[in-house]
Image (cartoon, helix red, strand yellow):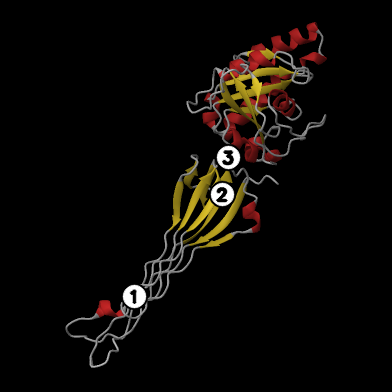
Amino acid sequence: MKFLDQAKIYIKAGDGGKGCVAFRREKFIEFGGPNGGDGGDGGSVYFEAVENLNTLIDFRYQQHFKAQKGQQGMGSEMTGYKGEDLIIKVPVGTEIVADDGETVLKDMVLAGERFLIAKGGKGGLGNTRFKTSTNQAPRYAGPGTPGEEIWVWLRLKIIADVGLIGLPNAGKSTFLSAVTAARPKIASYPFTTLHPHLGVAWVSGKEMVLADIPGLIEGAHDGVGLGDRFLKHVERCSVFLHLLDATADDVAADYKTIRKELELYNDKLKNTPVVVALNKCDALDEEELADKLKALKKVCKNQIFAISAVAHNNLEPCLRAVDALITRDNRVKMPENTDEIVIEKKPWSPLG
């Protein structure tokens, strides 16, 4: 299954059914009068957030959604059937955005919630409704009103507790695979990760969901390297884990690059709590590591951990520091009689 986090679709609610023009036709009743029924209302269109979806790929193959029209009215004052409502299911975390690409109509963050996006048209009145003292046999009926129609953007923002951020090849995917059961693609070249991955770990008796997004580069906030598409996936995170490559020439400059991109993309992100981890420390000797940590501490006021994801060095204290900053109250609690830090057996991933 491919991961798609943005789609544009057309939505049309059902039109109201026409009213009926009819008259009583009964034996011995010469002037029976009108008895045309009303038309049925058109079906409305709703969005529903569901937990078992994690991509918008289905909307690549179907872009037009139309609810059922209302049935036309019938004789004997029978009202037509109402058109069936259309429920469009989207992943939790999907934003419904207007055609202008900026106005957020609804943020679907709770599983099971519904949002009315297009209301069905009203059914037309039958000719019975138009009977008056001066017009005993009206030969016209209401046409029914059209249903609402709209173009909208769907934008999926992953919901996770922790966002793994950093430059390409900083070891984010390796870290995710080391602390969860997620298995993202790992290689020794930049931009190995092309779409977000999620993994689940248990820390201090509670569930921790980590999101690994593709590496960011300078200019990411303006869309360079699709950075703006990736940054939106960490907007909802309670805390960031900023991973740095210890083998890089200037770890302080790398740190400032990512911090700058976060602030330029959304000024609110600068207030998100951050834990900094210097990764790949197993590749350095003690003197080199001390120099890198010293340089990093000059520009970083956050807590810094020297770790190695591939060697599983110092990962536990790093995870505990991250866990202490998570603010969500609805996190799943770990079953009894289990270790304090375990790996979830069935992690969530956009690729299934």
Most foreground residue, 222 or 123: 123
Q: How far across and down, in percent of the image, does residue 160 sit?
A: 58, 31
- The residues bearing labels 1 and 2 have C-alpha atoms spaced at a distance of 40 Å
Give the mark toward the camera: 1 or 2.
Answer: 1
Which residue corresponds to the image point at 74% horizontal and 30% vertical from the top-left? 168
**Disc 1 marks which amino acid?**
Met
Residue 16 to residue 210: above or below? below
**Disc 3 marks which amino acid?**
Lys
The circle on residue 233 is: none
Q: Earlier in the sequence, mark 1 or mark 2?
A: 1
Which residue corresponds to the image point at 59% horizontal and 54% vertical from the top-left? 8
Q: Earlier in the sequence, mark 3 or mark 1?
A: 1
**Disc 2 marks which amino acid?**
Leu
Q: How far across and down, in percent of the image, does residue 5 sit?
A: 62, 45
Q: Which residue is mark 1?
A: 78
- The residues bearing labels 2 and 3 have C-alpha atoms spaced at a distance of 10 Å
Residue 65 to residue 316: above or below? below
Q: Which residue is mark 3?
A: 157
Q: How far across and down, in percent of the image, does residue 42 sit?
A: 42, 66
Exactly how many numbered labels are in the figure? 3
Residue 192 to residue 21: above or below? above
Q: Is residue 313 left or right of residue 75?
A: right
Which residue corresponds to the image point at 23% horizontal and 91% vertical from the top-left? 29
Q: Residues within 10 Å of mark 1 (few under 14, many from 20)?
A: some
Asked where in the image residue 59 lies, by quadrant, the reply is bottom right
Most foreground residue, 268 or 179: 179
Q: Which residue is mark 2?
A: 154
Asked where in the image residue 198 lies, by quadrant, the reply is top right
Residue 340 to residue 146: above or below? above
Q: How far across and down, in percent of the image, does residue 342 sit?
A: 65, 21
Which secondary structure, mark 1? loop
